[in-house]
Amino acid sequence: MGKFNLTKMQNIISSMKLDGWLFYDFRGSNELALNILEIPKERHLTRRFYYLIPSKGTPIKIVNAIEAGNLDHLPGDKLTYSDHSSLTNHLKNIITTHKIIAMEYSPFNAIPYVSKVDAGTIEQIKSFGADIRSSADLISMFDAIWTIELFNENKPVANALYEIVKKSFNFIKESLNENKRLNEYDVQQFIMKEFENRYYYTDSPPIVGVNENSANPHYAPDEKIHKQINKGDFVLIDLWAKVNRDNAVWADITWVGYIGDSIPNKYTKIFNIVAEARDAAFKLISDRFQQGEEVRGFEGDDAAREVIMKSGYGKYFIHRTGHSITSDLHGSGAHLDNYETRDERLILPSTSFSIEPGIYLTGDFGIRSEIDVFITKEGKVISTGGEWQKEIIHF
């Protein structure tokens, strides 16, 4: 998301008390580096390159003589190598004056989204005397920050998703009241048409899961595989979209409903637990920012998971609590996760993420309640879009 800006990057590096940020790639192995350094995916990359941004002073490029022009769009002095001994000498020389450096590495692979540099390269750089730190927080500071323009562009999309999900449940209601046959795929395509009418983009069709299908977090119907919707059914709808522009940011919500006048207690009980977990994560993060204290991704997950664990349904909460949201649906900032990974990245102002705890009872039903959260530049924690789901929709 961020546009390369040397001054901005050096300010970030200095704020983290580092001597530099060393980017490395071999044959497109580090897409984080390619994105930050604005190297097109179609660029012919067959040899190793390194790019050191020092906390102050001139960056240094280390490129193979065969592909000496691959970093020419970036500022800095160029060092070329052909054989491995010349590469080794260049690396030794830059590490001599830049001991504490960040790389795309996560200790013990705690955050696999960041671990893009292979162990051998880490060993080599350390052998020159480097103290290597994870670039995880630097990536968030550079790549996960929303501008005010992105936030304002996202607001109508976030509001529209709430309108669309309510229209979708109303579409189910009207169809069944008119005794029309209806299935998950029909509702999914209804939502896709709503996106089309608004010129929104989605990377894949939304989830519409009935009964046992709602217990599969990544279930999605298609034209051939889908389930009929009838009175007495439970329905989960998860939809996500953004303005049809590469750099636009996403909105992503999940709601649930029951087709009938009286909601069975088994659904209400689980929904209330999930909603309480959602609210607990939001409250923790909001309280920390109000108190001027830092909060990390794993702590948001802990807050939600504690509620579900205490209710006795911990083993049925089988995914992280939330994901970073940028121009990628699952972005490069902190995830709310102390389950699949231990995400120790800071939750930063001007970033966004989902909160979406769930309980999934395989073969019966699953309930997830998802909201999107944005931290303003001033540190105010707000949810985007409409009102959170407070109870199961029923009709």
Image (cartoon, grey):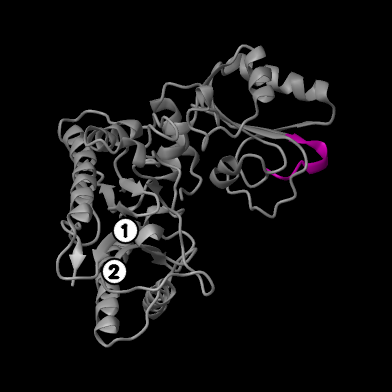
Q: Amino acid at mark 1?
A: Ile
Q: Amino acid at mark 2?
A: Val
Most foreground residue, 320 or 329: 320
**Residue 74 found in image quarter:** top right
Most foreground residue, 12 or 200: 200
**Residue 99 found in image quarter:** top right
Q: Is residue 96 visible?
A: yes
Is there a contact, CB below 8 Å, between mark 1 and mark 2? yes
Q: CA distance from mark 1 to mark 2?
A: 9 Å
* Residue that label 1 marks: 253
Residue 110 vertical position relative to residue 75 in the rendered view, above or below: above
Residue 233 vertical position relative to residue 27 in the rendered view, above or below: below
Boundaries of the magenta span:
63-71
N-terminal of the pair, mark 1 or mark 2, is 2
* Residue that label 2 marks: 165
Residue 390 vertical position relative to residue 97 in the rendered view, above or below: below
Residue 143: percent from left, percent from top: 45, 44
